[in-house]
Amino acid sequence: MTKIGINATAAFKKRRTGVEEYVYRLLEAVVRLKEAEKQEFVLYKDRRDQSELGFVLPKNFTTKEMYSPVAWTQTRLAAEMVFNRPDVLFIPVHILPPAHPENSIVTIHGLEYEYFPEYYSKLFLRYVRWSTKYAAKHARRIIAVSEATKNDLVSLYGAKPEKIEVIHHGFLNREAGAGSQNKAQNQKPFLLYLGRIELKKNILGILEAYQILKNRHQISHELILAGSPGFGYEKIKNKISQMAGLKSQIKNLGHVDEQTKWQLLANADAFLFPSFYEGFGLPILEAQSVGTPVIAGNISSMPEIAGAGAILVNPRSPEEIAAGIYRVLNRKEERKLLIERGFANLKRFSWGKCAKETLDVLIDSRP
């Protein structure tokens, strides 16, 4: 029996976004695997994260709470690796502690900060570059969540391609989503962006495309932005305030709960995701799962993840974004085909598959 340690603290966060959701769903799927019954698992977590898991851990899984006031991974988890080292350590959030087993595996989700350094503080850039390079060099194996991320690791950091395994995120077609596919009655039509409200997600490009559609085609749709504020939020708010005649038709909802999120996704006439960079792009799959046509960026991982189930556009061209949206709204046959291809695309992704492939990497890396 191999002792596998996992930095699971992200799974215990009360509010889960991309990486936290990945860790949570991956653990939820791992505990269901027959292969996992033959291993011993230790889940390391920060004592300050007190959210409960929504699933039961089997007897071969134990949770170890640890505390450090700062730099939990680099201090407290590192100390644990010195005094009570597992056979294999899995870090699903890329920050490898300085003390770690030889058999350590990290997941790297994206290198967007290398493409848009101006969106980050100098201190953050120094830290994230150092930590990612350190993990890429010292981990025995690397899991990349897309081929695009693997290519970035090789080209930007000189990582050895033979030690990188591409394992896509899974996708869970939750009842909340599946049950929301009937469009709400008597609701004003709207376009939807869902994700962090920040510059690197190309919110300004979405706003400009929306303005083009209003001015040129007089579409009746509102634009809904749903998500927590990120870098450049004030600039985005200022842009909205300057859009004379359209401010009242742009709804900036902030963070929304799961039920509201799925209702928005299911009722939107189009889902807008022309981001400048995505390590994976889970919202694309969420929109596809409820039959909402997707307009996504034609760069980084988005073509890989969306498959044939999206209109791909140049994110730096508001004209092209607007044209893609207009196609979705006005070409019924193309819209129908796009939705069908979106449903078909989802069959490539499952958390069970992600968990099985991840566990295979962990077991293969044991002594």
Image (cartoon, rainbow, N blue to C red):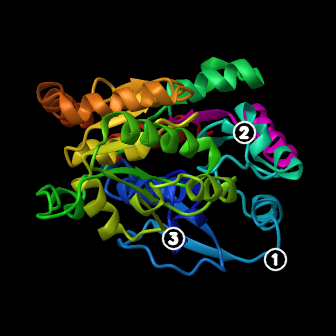
Q: In the picture provided, is 280 more to the left or to the right than 121?
A: left
* Magenta stretch in the rendered image: 126-145
Task: Say which element carries label 3.
Answer: loop
Q: Nearer the viewer, residue 360 or 25?
A: 25
Residue at (40%, 39%) from the top-left corner? 215
User: Mark number for residue 15?
Assistant: 3
Task: Say which element carries label 2.
Answer: helix
Residue ID for mark 1: 69
Name above or below for residue 89 compared with residue 188.
above
Counting residues from the start of the chain, the first of labels 2 and 1 encountered is 1
In space, the residues marked 2 and 3 are separated at their CA atoms by 23 Å
Name above or below for residue 114 compared with residue 352.
above
Q: Amino acid at mark 2?
A: Tyr
Instruction: Give the x, y percent position of residue 88.
Output: 62, 48
Instruction: Give the x, y percent position of residue 238.
Output: 65, 57
Question: Crowdedness of circle 2 by 10 Å Cα count: few (<14), some, many (20+)?
Answer: some
Question: Crowdedness of circle 3 by 10 Å Cα count: few (<14), some, many (20+)?
Answer: few
Query: Mark 2–mark 1 contact, CB under 8 Å?
Result: no
Q: Amino acid at mark 1?
A: Pro
